[in-house]
Each structure stands twice: as structure tokens, then as C-alpha cells.
Amino acid sequence: MAAGLASLYESVGGQLQALENAKGAEAASDLWSRYRLIRITDAMSTQGKRDETAAVLAKIRGDIAHRK
């Protein structure tokens, strides 16, 4: 699961960058703030933290989709 979380983290970062490139920095600034709060090494340390971080990333990804 840790590898899957790292992949999701990277994917969401790429989606945030694409949103920013397409719509401007203002469209993504609050999402970047939420994304940057994630400490991926710590987030992968336990199953509970992995689950919590995956939920946060899923929410960010959903918010990106609504802003496209």
C-alpha cells in the first residue's frame, strides 16, 4: 500500500500542476496548501496514516476535477 500511496501523491501533484498551468495559480493555490501539509514519509509509516492520507488526496483530486 505504501507504494500505491506514493504513486497517488505523485499523481495528485501532477494534476495540481496541470490545473495551475491551465487555470492560473489562483485556481490551485488553496489545493497546493492542503497538498503541501502532507508529509509523505510520515504518512506512509502506519496503515492508519496511509488510509487518512489517501482520503485527503482523494478529496484534493475530487476538488481538482471540479475546477477543470
Image (spheres, rainbow, N blue to C red):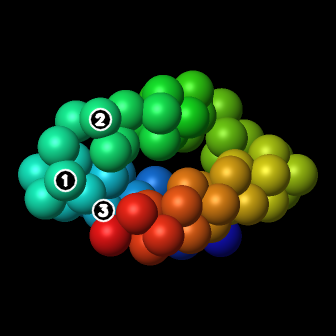
Please tell me in which quadrant of the rendered image residue 34 appears. Answer: top right
Residue type highlighted by circle 3:
Gln
Please tell me in which quadrant of the rendered image residue 50 appears. Answer: bottom right
Point out the tag, 1 or 3, that comes first from the N-terminus: 3
* Residue drawn at point x = 68 percent, y = 52 percent: 56
The residues bearing labels 3 and 2 have C-alpha atoms spaced at a distance of 15 Å
Q: Which circle marks residue 64 in the picture?
A: none
The residue labelled by disc 1 is 23
Q: Are marks 2 and 1 in contact (CB under 8 Å)?
A: yes
Q: Is residue 40 visible?
A: yes
Percent of width and height locating residue 61: 51, 65
| Circle 3 crowding by C-alpha within 10 Å: few under 14, some 14–19, many from 20 | some
In this view, the mark in front (1 or 3) = 1
The residue labelled by disc 3 is 15
Say which element carries label 1.
Answer: helix
Residue type highlighted by circle 2:
Glu
Q: Residue furthest left?
A: 21
Percent of width and height locating residue 2: 60, 61
21 and 67: which one is in front? 67
In this view, the mark in front (3 or 2) = 2
Residue type highlighted by circle 1:
Lys
Percent of width and height locating residue 44: 65, 47
The C terminus lies in which quarter of the figure?
Answer: bottom left
Asked whether, in this view, residue 42 is left or right of residue 41, the answer is: right
Report the label total: 3
Point out the tag, 3 or 2, that comes first from the N-terminus: 3
The residue labelled by disc 2 is 26
* Residue drawn at point x = 35 percent, y = 43 percent: 28
The residues bearing labels 2 and 1 have C-alpha atoms spaced at a distance of 8 Å
| Circle 2 crowding by C-alpha within 10 Å: few under 14, some 14–19, many from 20 | few
Q: Is residue 41 visible?
A: no
Asked whether, in this view, residue 38 is left or right of residue 47, the answer is: left
